[in-house]
Image (cartoon, rainbow, N blue to C red):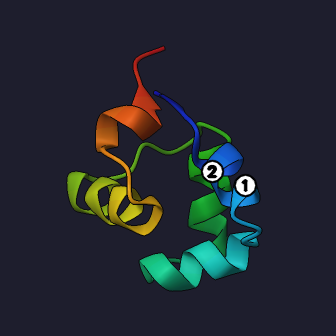
């Protein structure tokens, strides 16, 4: 799954650690999601969309 997590995070000036703390996950999880190596669970995808104030569809797209 393609995503805009890295782009959105850097636009806000957040580090990977900042985002991980907001999502209550490890920094390694954020790295894996940003690199497309891990697709988040539905609850985590909702948490990511809430953190950025966007819909899931605005963040995640099919490849």
Q: Relative to 44, does residue 1 appear above or below in the rendering?
A: above
Secondary structure of residue under mark 1: helix
Q: Quadrant of residue 35?
A: top right
- Extreme-left residue of the structure: 43
Q: CA distance from mark 1 to mark 2?
A: 5 Å
Circle 1 residues within 10 Å: few <14, some 14–19, many ≥20? few
Residue 39 position within the rendered picture, expressed as x and y whole percent measured from the top left: 42, 43
Q: Relative to 20, does residue 55 appear above or below in the rendering?
A: above
Q: Quadrant of residue 44?
A: bottom left
Task: Tell me the residue at 22%/52% (across/down).
Answer: 42
| Numbered disc total | 2
Circle 2 residues within 10 Å: few <14, some 14–19, many ≥20? few
| Relative horizontal placement of residue 53, taking residue 8 as reference (left or right) | left
Residue 59 position within the rendered picture, expressed as x and y whole percent measured from the top left: 45, 39
Q: Using the image, tell me which numbered label, if any, was put on residue 11.
A: 1
Reading the image, the residue beneath label 2 is 8
Residue 47 position within the rendered picture, expressed as x and y whole percent measured from the top left: 33, 66
Task: Tell me the residue at 31%/42% (across/down).
Answer: 56
Residue 14 position within the rendered picture, expressed as x and y whole percent measured from the top left: 72, 71
Depth check, front residue: 40 or 19:
19
- Extreme-top residue of the structure: 63
Secondary structure of residue under mark 2: helix
Q: Do the residues under discs 1 and 2 have CB atoms within 8 angstroms?
A: yes
Task: Tell me the residue at 56%/64% (across/down).
Answer: 29
Q: Using the image, tell me which numbered label, if any, was put on residue 48.
A: none
| Relative horizontal placement of residue 46, taking residue 53 as reference (left or right) | left
Task: Tell me the residue at 39%/59% (across/down).
Answer: 53
């Amino acid at each position: 799954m393609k995503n805009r997590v890295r782009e959105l995070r850097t636009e806000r000036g957040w580090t990977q650690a900042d985002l991980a703390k907001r999502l209550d996950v490890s920094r390694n999880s954020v790295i894996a999601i940003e690199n497309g190596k891990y697709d988040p669970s539905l609850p985590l995808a909702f948490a990511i969309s809430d953190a950025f104030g966007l819909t899931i569809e605005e963040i995640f797209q099919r490849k």
